[in-house]
Image (cartoon, rainbow, N blue to C red):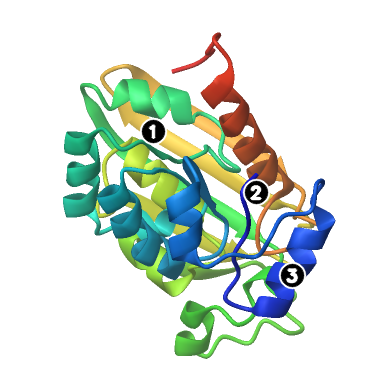
């Protein structure tokens, strides 16, 4: 590893010290000069800044905050034309390989229903805008229903899986999302339903929240590790 960067210097230094061997804290431009692959694990806003830099400098980019790629079709086209790899792990979703296969012809609808503990949604722009009180919630409450494009804007730290699903399938406007705050659950539950010429697919995951960040799932972290391994292993399994 070449180095790390965080817009909060103290957090960057703390992360650098946890790595073995310890690496320096560098600026984004210094990282781009020295690295072959940059891993984003910050926010959709960070992706919006890093994607143009990666394309211009012909550097591979692994994106965890996939919501930052929505609306960036022009830069993704440039990346494709220049041969710049942009990697998006499956994250906390199951069935993404089948969605990709079905999208090659005859995929008609894709719907994501996500249930999360209310505490993981506290502070989201969509919660604040709707003035939803999550404290003391006793019954499941649908806090969002609509296209993935708007879901990612209103819940940027909670529903990146919707962006990933959109990129693999029908796009952000045709992918439907239903987000439920459910006080009865202690895991992040994602249910994907897809219908097309191939038939019907239903995939469900019940993911333990990450111990470091309850707004995401443990499986999302493991998915990033698996993606990195896939980049260097000769055998690739799955679509």
Q: Helix, strand, or loop for circle 1?
A: strand
Q: Residue at x 66, y 78 (%)?
A: 9
| Callout 2: SS | strand
Q: Is residue 217 above or below residue 135?
A: above
Q: Which residue is mark 2?
A: 189
Task: Pick the residue in front: 52 or 118.
Answer: 52
- Residue 217 % position (x, y): 69, 51
Q: Residue at x 50, y 45 (%)?
A: 35
Q: Nearer the viewer, residue 239 or 121?
A: 239
Does 116 appear above or below 127? Answer: above
83 and 167: which is toward the camera: 83
Q: Label 3: few (<14), some or many (≥20) within 10 Å?
A: some
How far, Cα to Cα, is label 1 from label 3?
A: 43 Å
Q: Earlier in the sequence, mark 3 or mark 2?
A: 3
Q: Is residue 213 left or right of residue 70?
A: right
- Confirm or deny contact between disc 2 and disc 1 (CB under 8 A): no
Q: CA distance from mark 3 to mark 2?
A: 34 Å
* Lower sequence index among marks 1 and 3: 3
Q: Circle 3 sits on which residue?
A: 13
Q: Where residue 199 sits in the image (x, y, percent)?
A: 35, 19
Disc number for residue 194: 1
Residue 179 lies left or right of residue 1; in this view the side is left
- Label count reads 3
């Amino acid at each position: 590893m070449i180095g790390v960067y965080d817009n909060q210097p103290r957090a960057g230094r703390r992360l650098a010290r946890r790595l073995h061997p310890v690496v320096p804290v560098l600026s984004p431009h210094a990282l781009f000069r020295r690295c072959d692959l940059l891993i984003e694990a910050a926010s959709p806003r960070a992706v919006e800044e890093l994607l143009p830099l990666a394309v211009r400098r012909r550097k591979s980019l692994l994106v965890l905050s996939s919501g930052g790629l929505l609306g960036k079709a022009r830069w993704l086209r440039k990346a494709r034309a220049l041969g710049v790899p942009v990697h998006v792990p499956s994250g906390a979703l199951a069935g993404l390989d089948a969605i990709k296969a079905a999208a090659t012809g005859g995929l008609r609808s894709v719907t994501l229903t996500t249930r999360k503990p209310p505490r993981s949604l506290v502070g989201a722009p969509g919660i604040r805008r709707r003035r939803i009180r999550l404290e003391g919630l006793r019954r499941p409450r649908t806090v969002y229903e609509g296209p993935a494009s708007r879901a990612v804007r209103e819940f940027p730290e909670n529903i990146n899986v919707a962006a990933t699903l959109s990129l693999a399938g029908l796009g952000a406007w045709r992918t439907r999302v239903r987000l439920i705050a459910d006080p009865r659950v202690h895991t992040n539950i994602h249910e994907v339903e897809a219908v097309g010429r191939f038939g019907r697919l239903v995939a469900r995951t019940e993911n333990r929240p990450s111990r470091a960040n309850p707004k995401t799932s443990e499986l999302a972290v493991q998915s990033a590790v698996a993606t990195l391994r896939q980049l260097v292993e000769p055998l690739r399994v799955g679509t």
